[in-house]
Image: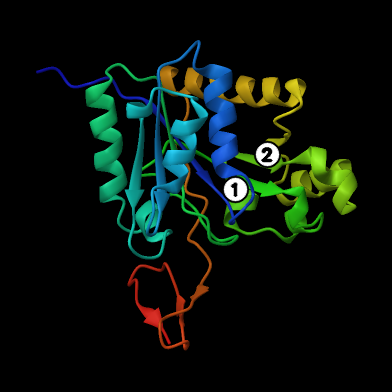
């Protein structure tokens, strides 16, 4: 049997509540008429994000699949990407040819980055409700993801955020790398996002885009059952420092 076509694999990361699933739905709605798309969601104990996307009707339900990581959601996109790679390859085989597979990280904090062994390009998502100062604080995803999305800009008047200043801060933190200020109610911003995705797909097909590693995740805290918790690092030895 011939190998299935290799899709553009696009990772989407960011803290809890920034609208990653909503962003996936927006991309699907904008591009499902032009591209063959599949979706992989990640969460620790649930397939809730996949069920949300299926119920939203953005794709045929069988094109949306869930990976339940059972542990730190970062590990499944960074350290041991096997479950996600298998899910992507299954989608590519079942719906050959796929143009685009969107891989949504489980939400956690500002540290998440995808391994370039899993994805070809990655988006990092912030939202205005998290505060206008978040973008300038940086971090590997904010600073070096292929695209930073400042999401939910329609909420800015209600949370006292200056979107233009937040985007300017993001551009400075990213040394000019691409930033999109997005609202799912603003067609112009959706068109900008769509254009970026299509441009990345064109570069992927032409072989002119090389997946980049934004760098390792910063150490971050995990609570545990006894309440003590531990600091989780994603360095090469993968040890936990308690």
Front position in the image: 42 or 231: 42
Q: Which residue is label 1 attached to?
A: 144
216 relative position to 166: left or right: left
Q: Quadrant of the C terminus?
A: bottom left
Farthest residue, direction front: 55
Q: Is residue 105 rendered to the left or right of residue 140?
A: left
Q: State the SS at label 1.
A: helix
- x, y percentage for residue 26? 59, 28
Which residue is outermost to the top? 34
How crowded pointer 1 is (Cα within 10 Å; few <14, some 14-19, many 20+) is rated as many
Residue at image point 81% right, 49% down: 169
Q: Is residue 240 above or below residue 6?
A: below
Residue in the picture at 37% in, 28% down: 61
Q: Is residue 15 above or below residue 101?
A: below
Q: Residue at x 55, y 31 (%)?
A: 25
Q: In the rendered structure, are the residues bearing label 1 and label 2 in contact, judged by CB atoms less than 8 Å apart?
A: yes
Quadrant assignment for the N terminus: top left
> Which residue lies under the disc numbered 2?
177
* Residue nearest the observer in this picture, 140 or 19: 19
Q: From the viewer's side, name the closer residue of 53 and 187.
A: 53
Residue 199 visible in the current orientation: no
Q: Nearer the viewer, residue 20 or 231?
A: 20
- Left/right of residue 80 with respect to residue 177 in the rendered view: left
- The answer to whether 97 appears left or right of 206 in the picture is left
Whether residue 242 is visible, yes or no, is: yes
Instruction: Give residue 64's position: percent from left, percent from top.
Output: 38, 33
Q: Give the x, y percent position of residue 134.
A: 74, 58
Total marks placed:
2
- Give the CA separation, mark 1 to mark 2: 8 Å
Q: Quadrant of residue 6?
A: top left
């Amino acid at each position: 049997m011939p190998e299935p076509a290799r899709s553009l694999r696009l990772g989407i990361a960011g803290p809890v509540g920034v609208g990653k699933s909503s962003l996936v739905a927006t991309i699907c709605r904008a591009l499902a008429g032009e591209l063959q798309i599949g979706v992989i969601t990640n969460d620790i104990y649930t397939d809730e994000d996949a069920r949300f996307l299926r119920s939203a009707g953005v794709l045929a339900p069988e094109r949306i699949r869930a990976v339940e990581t059972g542990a730190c959601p970062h590990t499944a996109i960074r350290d041991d990407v096997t479950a996600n790679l298998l899910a992507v390859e299954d989608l590519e085989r079942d719906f050959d040819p796929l143009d685009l597979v969107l891989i949504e990280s489980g939400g956690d904090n500002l540290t998440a980055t995808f391994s370039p062994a899993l994805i070809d390009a990655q988006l990092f998502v912030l939202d205005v409700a998290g505060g206008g100062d978040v973008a300038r604080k940086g971090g590997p995803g904010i600073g070096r993801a292929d695209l930073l999305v400042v999401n939910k800009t329609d909420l800015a008047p209600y949370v006292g955020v200056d979107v233009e200043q937040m985007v300017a801060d993001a551009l400075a933190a990213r040394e000019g790398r691409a930033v999109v200020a997005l609202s799912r109610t603003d067609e112009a911003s959706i068109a900008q996002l769509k254009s970026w995705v299509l441009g990345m797909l064109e570069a992927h097909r032409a072989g002119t885009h090389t997946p980049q590693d934004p760098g390792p995740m910063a150490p971050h805290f995990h609570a545990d059952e006894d309440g003590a918790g531990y600091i989780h690092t994603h360095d090469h030895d993968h040890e936990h420092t308690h």
